[in-house]
Image (cartoon, helix red, strand yellow):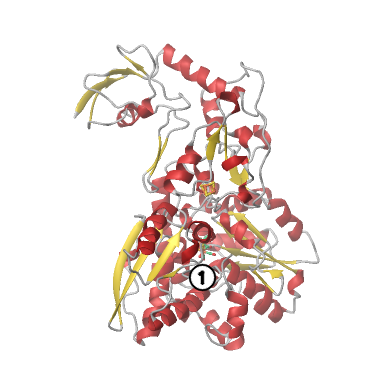
């Protein structure tokens, strides 16, 4: 242990502890801006570029940054001397001098870490005025928005994109005042290897990286009397959106959400978990076919568009491995515009499908030309959990005080299996529940596949199905996907089924979810919320969903039928 003094308090901490962490142990909150540590994502940014966390150390002339300075025996640290406070303030004011002052109309207003610090520091004047860097806004992808004038060079996005996700889409160019973080050759994002996973959005302290918004388009559709506007809600949204209304992370608001969506005028309120159950049936069929034939293994899940973009760009030789299934978002949209529209006598051209997703990449997926049926897009607008929260607030809906209602039939009925899609390992577990029973003809007594749960980035298990050992893995975070895919390419790893989610811990940690401070804890709570729903659901296996059974009886025929392929599969994912 190392003994130090911080603001006259004696503290003993393990060797290697930073001044910042030692201070935390003494309940001293040193302000930070660029620093961020997310254990579950294996993310650490301690480049110390902002100099907001400087402290005074007895015997040292400079003011070292607390986030990158390890403690040494006998160190005497002061975190709030006049010199420290005025240095921090000056550093903050210099950052602000090159930042737009349009907070009132900024997408990140009230969630911006720079704005919060300016408020906490009592900054009430613009002391340094001068030339400001000017850059174009990039919305070329329709999913991720880059506004470099709001960048404070914290480098969090680069660490996330390059080290955690191993995508390599963002790099710093230029020197000094002219430095900008951008894709290679400063090309638009749509021409870069970006997969739109949105993890850079989750860590950006300002609005330099956000999602492209579609709120006004959705309001326009809702106010258009000629359109039937239906909405679907992703699994992970129900355990997170409450945070925007003062509720605890993980609090389950499924019923309140259904009521709230009706209040703002949606004509049909559906559940993406219905589409998740449908995915299990279609993908389950593919899994069984491939297991039986032994061909094209491992089968890789295809519901995460960030991951699909990643394999297309980085592992083109493995492109035959993902399931041909569309994602639950797209399946729900296709069934709404075809089966449901037909039942209701609505022309699909007059129907608008809105999806509420925890995700940025879903915006990109919804706009892909082949994610459509007979030329009509399955989903018209994909908005994030954050965007829906804003719409509800604008529409005078207080989610917290909504009554509990249910989703509309038939695209509102779902099972516990569909709900756990929102956590890493959930898609795999849901598929196993169905594949086991269909493959063996036996009833699965214990539906809980504990081995594939958890938040470690790589989880593996071997499961016995009809005397065959089925090797499965659940991967989250693209860096983890890369590690395993590289082994597969080299012939060093042999799996049968792999679930891959681009975001560490899965959709609960998507780039469209409410911003949060204690991220690791928040993710844990959201995951607990999803498994709680599953445990208490009367039906926990997708193939037992009565609405899905009816859909096949009335319309699709059997899993993998011609019509199922037309609506629910793609020829290839690019
Ligand atoms: Fe997901 Fe999925 S689980 S991809 O994370 O397969 O976004 O929640 O909706 O489509 O169901 C996201 C979540 C979501 C799809 C499902
Ligand atoms: Fe990188 Fe994902 Fe951000 Fe694209 S969205 S720049 S891939 S972190």
Residue at the far left: name it.
1
Label 1 C-beta lies within 8 Å of the nearest ligand 1 atom? yes
User: What residue would you read off at disc 1?
Assistant: 276
Point out residue 553 in the picture as x, y percentages from the top left corner. 57, 88
Where 569 sits versus 231, above or below? Answer: below
Camera-side residue: 36 or 296?
Answer: 296
Neighbour tally class for label 1: few under 14, some 14-19, many 20 plus, Cα within 10 Å: many
Residue at the spot 54% in from the left edge and 47% down from the top edge: 244
Question: Is residue 60 in sight in this rendering?
Answer: yes
Question: Is residue 183 in sight in this rendering?
Answer: no
Point out residue 107 in the picture as x, y percentages from the top left corner. 63, 41
Camera-side residue: 97 or 259?
Answer: 97
Left or right: residue 310 versus residue 451 is: right
Left or right: residue 90 versus residue 8 is: right
Camera-side residue: 320 or 301?
Answer: 320
Image quadrant where one finds the C terminus: bottom right
Residue at the spot 47% in from the left edge and 16% down from the top edge: 87
Point out residue 156 in the picture as x, y percentages from the top left corner. 48, 38
């Amino acid at each position: 242990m190392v003994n130090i003094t911080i603001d006259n308090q004696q503290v003993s901490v393990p060797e290697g502890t930073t001044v910042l962490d030692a201070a935390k142990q003494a309940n001293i909150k040193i302000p930070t801006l660029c620093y961020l540590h997310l254990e579950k994502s294996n993310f650490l940014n301690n480049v110390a570029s902002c100099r907001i966390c400087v402290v005074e150390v007895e015997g040292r002339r400079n003011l070292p940054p607390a986030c990158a300075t390890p403690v040494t025996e006998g160190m005497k640290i002061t975190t709030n001397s006049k010199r420290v406070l005025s240095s921090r303030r000056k550093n903050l004011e210099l950052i602000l001098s090159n930042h737009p002052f349009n907070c009132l109309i900024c997408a990140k207003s009230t969630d911006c870490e720079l704005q919060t610090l300016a408020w906490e520091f009592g900054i009430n004047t613009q002391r340094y005025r001068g030339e400001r860097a000017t850059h174009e806004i990039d919305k070329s992808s329709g999913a991720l928005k880059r506004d470099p004038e709001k960048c404070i060079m914290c480098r969090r996005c680069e660490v996330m994109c390059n080290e955690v996700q191993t995508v390599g889409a963002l790099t710093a160019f230029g020197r000094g005042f002219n430095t900008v973080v951008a894709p290679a050759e400063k090309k638009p994002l749509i021409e870069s290897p970006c997969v739109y996973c949105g993890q850079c959005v989750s860590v950006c302290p300002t609005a330099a990286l956000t999602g492209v918004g579609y709120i006004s388009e959705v309001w326009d559709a809702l106010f258009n009397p000629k359109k039937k506007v239906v909405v679907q809600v992703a699994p992970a949204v129900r355990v997170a959106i409450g945070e925007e209304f003062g509720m605890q992370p993980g609090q389950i608001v499924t019923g309140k959400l259904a009521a709230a969506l009706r209040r703002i005028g949606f004509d049909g309120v559906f559940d993406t978990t219905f589409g998740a159950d449908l995915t299990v049936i279609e993908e389950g069929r593919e899994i069984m076919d491939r297991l039986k034939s032994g061909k094209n293994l491992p089968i890789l899940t295809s519901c995460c568009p960030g991951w699909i973009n990643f394999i297309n760009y980085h592992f083109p030789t493995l492109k035959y491995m993902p399931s041909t299934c569309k994602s639950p978002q797209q399946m729900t949209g296709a069934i709404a515009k075809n089966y449901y529209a037909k039942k209701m006598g609505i022309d699909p051209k007059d129907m608008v499908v809105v999806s509420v997703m925890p995700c940025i990449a879903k915006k990109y997926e919804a706009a892909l030309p082949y994610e459509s049926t007979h030329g009509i897009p399955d989903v018209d607008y994909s908005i994030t959990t954050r965007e829906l929260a804003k719409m509800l607030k604008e529409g005078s809906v207080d989610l917290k005080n909504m009554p509990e209602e249910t989703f509309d039939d038939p695209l509102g009925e779902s099972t516990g299996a569909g709900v756990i899609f929102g956590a890493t390992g959930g898609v795999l577990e849901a598929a196993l529940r169905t594949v086991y029973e269909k493959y063996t003809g036996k009833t699965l007594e214990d539906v809980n596949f504990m081995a594939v749960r958890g938040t470690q980035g790589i989880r593996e298990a071997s499961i016995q199905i009809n005397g065959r050992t089925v090797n499965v893995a659940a991967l989250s975070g693209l860096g983890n996907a890369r590690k395993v895919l590289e082994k597969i390419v080299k012939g060093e790893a042999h799996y049968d089924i792999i679930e891959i989610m681009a975001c560490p811990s899965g959709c609960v940690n998507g780039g469209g979810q409410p911003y949060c401070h204690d991220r690791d804890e928040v993710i844990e709570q959201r995951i607990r919320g999803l498994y709680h729903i599953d445990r208490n659901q009367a039906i926990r296996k997708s193939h037992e969903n009565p609405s899905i059974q009816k859909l096949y009886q009335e319309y699709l025929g059997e899993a993998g039928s011609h019509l199922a392929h037309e609506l629910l599969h793609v020829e290839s994912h690019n």
